[in-house]
Amino acid sequence: MISKVRDICNEKKQYFVCEGAGGKSDKRFTAGILHKLNQPCNSKELEYIKSILGNFSHQFMEFYKNYNGALLFCDSLSDTAGFELAPVADWERLGEEMRAWYDLLDDEEREIDEFDWLNDGITFGQVPHSGNYFVLALSGSNKGKIIYSDHDGLEPTVYADSLFEFLEKIISNPVNEIEHLGCYARYSDGKTNIQWIPIQYLVNR
């Protein structure tokens, strides 16, 4: 899986064919796409991953020993990105941000199965600019799975059974996943205020 991610990220010419949000344009815009892969984790960071993820650390260790996080399907003309795997140093902060959305829940609500991952889940990623997060459940009915924490209505769902399945979904069909996760990624033409929404992913080899 790591080599597949690397190959995708190294493709030189990648694009999203987009349509305008809200019917503001009947035209199409082709947005240039790039990916930002961070440098590998150091030994201390890898030990941290192993210590907090325990039995679920293997795939995370495999990814993070190559890249300490990544921004995937970034807009070449703005700060938009489709998905973020956060650097290890950001996990705790993201976890605090994620849990803040659930402050309205009382103790009884937190005990139901829908939220049984909340207290000790590790927030390792997000959909940028959305308030929605990817969380590895360390306990509860979905232990070991990736939860998509959607702040809209506080309706978390299982997104993937593992980190590698998570990555496979994203890189195999990014347009579908951007739409499925709430269509928060809006791309720019650098000239107008139209928010361009991806409808097709193209790679020119």
Image (tube, rainbow, N blue to C red):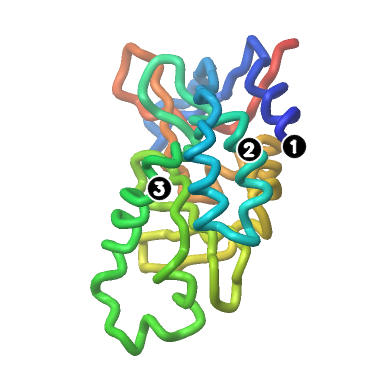
Return the disc, 3 or 2, that comes first in the chain's sequence. 2
Q: Secondary structure at mark 2?
A: helix
Secondary-structure class at tag 1: loop
Query: In the rendering, which numbered label is found on residue 1?
Result: 1
- So how many labels did they put on this image? 3
Q: Can you tell which mark lies on residue 91?
A: 3
- Which amino acid type is marked by label 3? Trp
Contact, CB < 8 Å: mark 2 with mark 1?
A: yes
Q: Position of residue 198 (x, y in %)?
A: 54, 31
Residue drawn at x 59%, y 78% as measured from the top left: 141
**Is residue 91 placed above or below 112 in the rendered structure?**
above
Q: Amino acid at mark 1?
A: Met
Q: Are marks 1 and 3 in contact (CB under 8 Å)?
A: no
| Chain-order first, disc 1 or disc 3 | 1
The quarter of the image holding the N terminus is top right
* Residue 66 x %, y %: 62, 29
Above-or-below relation of 107 to 80: below
Q: Residues within 10 Å of mark 2 (few under 14, many from 20)?
A: some
Q: Residue at x 64, y 10 (%)?
A: 12
For this orientation, the residue located farthest to the bottom is 108
On residue 122, the disc is none
* Front position in the image: 114 or 152: 114
- For disc 2, the marked residue is 63
* Residue 108 vertical position relative to residue 164 in the rendered view, above or below: below
Inter-mark Cα distance, 1 to 3: 22 Å
